[in-house]
Amino acid sequence: MNIGSTSGSSFSIATAGIQQSTEQVKQASQQVVEATTARPAQGTVEVTDALVKLKQGEQGVEANAKVLEAADKQIGTLLDIEA
């Protein structure tokens, strides 16, 4: 596993994943607002879809944060071994 700061490393992939998931959360939140304020009676399906996307984005951020934690621990372990 490549854990450095190069392209394809755990850090860069997890950071990109967090950015993508954060953008998904932002868009889904906006969709929830639009569906509930513009036409609340007709927006049930739209709200449901947006809430699912919101939850997926949240889980994406959490999963990528765990990847970052694991990579950080791995680098810490490697530094401890070298010291």
Image: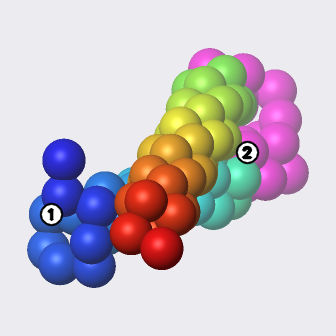
Q: List the residue tagged with mark 2.
A: 32
- Residue 56 against residue 79 in the figure, above or below: above
Seen in the picture, residue 58 relative to 5 is either above or below; the reply is above
- Closer to the camera, 3 or 54? 3
Query: Quick one: SS at disc 2?
Result: helix
Mark 1, residue position: 8
Does the stretch in magenta take in 40? yes
Q: Residue furthest left?
A: 7
Which is nearer the eye, 32 or 6?
6
* In the foreground, 70 or 19: 70
Within 10 Å of disc 2 (Cα), the crowding (few <14, some 14-19, many 20+) is some
Mark 1 is surrounded, within 10 Å at the Cα level, by few (under 14), some (14 to 19) or many (20 or more) other residues, namely few
The amino acid marked with disc number 2 is Val
Residue shown at 57% from the left, 43% from the top:
66
- What is the magenta range? 31-46
Cα–Cα gap, marks 1 and 2: 34 Å
Apparent side of residue 52 relative to residue 83 in the rendered image (left or right): right
Magenta includes 4? no
Residue positioned 49% across, 55% down in the render: 77
For residue 35, which quarter of the picture?
top right
- Residue 22: x and y in percent read 57, 60
Q: Position of residue 42 (x, y in %)?
A: 71, 27
**Residue 48: x %, y % from top left:** 67, 22
Q: Nearer the viewer, mark 1 or mark 2?
A: 1
Disc number at residue 21?
none
Side of 19 relative to 3 (left or right): right
Indicate how the structure is coloured in the image: rainbow
